[in-house]
Image (cartoon, rainbow, N blue to C red):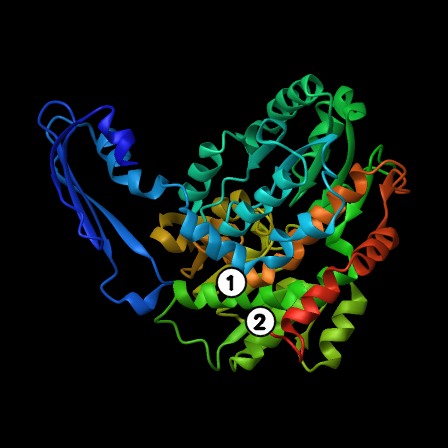
């Protein structure tokens, strides 16, 4: 970062580094001045050994515009991860990082992956493994989902430092055009690795001519699988980590726990004990959230449009009803958590909300709540800062869309700890290696049982159990 600034600035003064600190003063053309300080932590035990902080101080803005000032101050957020940090990330994710030792050598040498995965620190270890398995940087395209994670800018900077092509999700069709051209130039077939159904639906609806240039899809989320329901037949094989027994056994509790932890972080002064909560959607994640909220002494109600799930919630002692509006009216929840993977709370439901409440989603993007419809039913819409958006309803009650209706577990957070997500990201790479192999045996369409056979027979679970089981020797 210092070198980048030096190209467009005059270095006024550099204090000698003593091994624990450095101090650089820079003039940014004209009369603007900044100060860049690097130093050891005041409380070293709060972070891994070898951790330092970088602080940028704008001592004199001079003639810089507000946009230029913001760009300068955000520079410290765009620092690629250091070698020390990457070693720590690899330590946290041995299953993913060590896959090149267990999968066939260069098993991705004939494919060009499109990676649509959350831009968190675990993703960087995944990208390293993909490259080590035979997919060079020029054969990779990353689709940026646009969420605000804790380290979004640093992850993006790290990808840029590796010269990996990154496209915003709003231009997925253009990204696929570009990727297909680059893959063809490298004599490779495209391979989709997706988290949320961003790519194959775009190929099917906007770029069907590109389908023959892709060998398959590895999908991580039920949300992504749901998006494919409108097609009775799919032209590509799907390796469904989303529907696998492995993911069901490991990830759901972790996501639910991350969602509740982040909610408590965002609402540190709120009292939830003894208050009513409503969980909409009693699937894998919803049932875990309901149990966690009950463990926090909330009075939890559940609604699900699938009767078998509703009965399951009822038998476990939750208040239930087939009618969402009646639960909103009679239970009057302080907290409403949507986990359906679809749109659950619509404009029509605003009329029965009579008390201040928080709407929290664990569904991909902002589809859980019909935000536009709710906005039409609001007397006033306000900015709640980092918390999200606040709707003043006509009843006088306030409904706060936490994280603006996007999944709370990612909102300025890392969601799952890396040791948790390690198994899932490793599973995605196993899926990619499977679909990249000639004669893989996966037919066009969904292959849930075949996915289970591969994931349960590839050795990942054995290594996971050795790491976290009763005889773990971490």
Q: State the residue in front, 149 or 98.
A: 98
Q: Position of residue 172 (x, y in %)?
A: 61, 29
Q: Nearer the viewer, residue 391 or 206?
A: 206
Q: Nearer the viewer, residue 61 or 372?
A: 61
Label number found at residue 353: 1
Q: Secondary structure at mark 2?
A: loop
Q: Position of residue 3 (x, y in %)?
A: 28, 31
Q: Residue at x 87, y 55 (%)?
A: 449
Please tell me in which quadrant of the rendered image residue 110 appears.
top right
Q: Is residue 250 above or below residue 449?
A: below
Look at the image and tell me in which quarter the N terminus lies.
top left
Taking 257 as reference, is 326 left or right? right
* Front position in the image: 333 or 125: 125
> Within 10 angstroms of label 2, few (less than 14), some, or many (20 or more) residues?
few
Q: Position of residue 334 (x, y in %)?
A: 48, 69
Give the vertical position of 53 relative to 136 (above or below).
below
- Which residue matches tag 2? 474
Report the side of 469 relative to 123 (left or right): right
Q: Is residue 464 left or right of residue 434?
A: left
């Amino acid at each position: 970062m210092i070198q980048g600034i030096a190209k467009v600035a005059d270095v006024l003064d550099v204090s000698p580094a003593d091994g624990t600190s450095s101090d650089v003063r820079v003039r940014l053309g004209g009369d603007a001045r900044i100060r860049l300080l690097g130093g050891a932590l005041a409380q070293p035990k709060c972070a891994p050994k070898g951790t330092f902080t970088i602080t940028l101080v704008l001592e004199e803005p001079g003639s810089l515009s507000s946009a230029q000032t913001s760009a300068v101050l955000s520079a410290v957020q765009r620092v690629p991860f250091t070698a020390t940090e990457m070693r720590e990330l690899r330590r946290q994710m041995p299953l993913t990082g060590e896959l090149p030792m267990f999968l066939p050598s260069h098993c991705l040498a004939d494919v060009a992956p499109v990676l649509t995965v959350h831009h968190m620190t675990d993703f960087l270890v995944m990208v390293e493994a993909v490259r080590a398995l035979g997919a060079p940087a020029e054969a990779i395209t990353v689709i940026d989902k646009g969420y605000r994670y804790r380290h979004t800018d640093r992850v993006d900077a790290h990808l840029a430092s590796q010269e990996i092509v990154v496209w915003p999700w709003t231009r997925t069709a253009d990204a696929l055009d570009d990727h297909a051209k680059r893959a063809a130039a490298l004599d490779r077939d495209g391979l989709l690795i997706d988290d949320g159904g961003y790519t194959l639906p775009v190929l099917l609806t906007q770029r069907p001519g590109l389908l023959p240039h892709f060998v398959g899809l590895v999908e991580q989320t039920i949300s992504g699988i749901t998006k494919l329901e409108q097609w009775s037949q799919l032209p590509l094989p799907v390796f469904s980590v989303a529907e696998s027994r492995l993911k069901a056994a490991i990830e759901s509790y972790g996501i639910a726990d991350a969602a509740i932890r982040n909610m408590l972080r965002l609402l540190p002064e709120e009292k939830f004990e003894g208050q009513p909560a409503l969980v909409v959607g009693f699937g894998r994640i919803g049932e875990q959230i309901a149990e966690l909220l009950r463990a926090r002494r909330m009075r939890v109600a559940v609604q699900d449009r699938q009767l078998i799930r509703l009965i399951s919630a009822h038998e476990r002692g939750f208040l239930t009803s087939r009618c969402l509006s009646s639960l909103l009216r009679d239970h009057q929840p302080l907290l409403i958590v949507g986990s359906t993977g679809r749109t659950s709370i619509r404009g029509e439901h605003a009329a029965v909300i009579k008390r201040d409440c928080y709407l929290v989603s664990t569904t991909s993007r902002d589809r859980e709540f019909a935000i536009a419809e709710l906005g039409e039913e609001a007397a006033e819409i306000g900015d709640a800062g980092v918390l999200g958006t606040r709707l003043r309803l006509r009843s006088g009650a306030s409904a706060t869309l936490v994280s603006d209706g996007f999944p709370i577990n990612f909102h300025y957070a890392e969601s799952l700890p890396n040791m948790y997500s390690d198994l899932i990201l490793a599973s995605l790479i196993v899926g990619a290696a499977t679909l990249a192999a000639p004669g893989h045996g996966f037919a066009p369409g969904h292959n849930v049982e075949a996915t289970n056979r591969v994931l349960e027979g590839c050795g990942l679970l054995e290594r996971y159990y050795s790491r976290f089981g009763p005889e773990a020797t971490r």
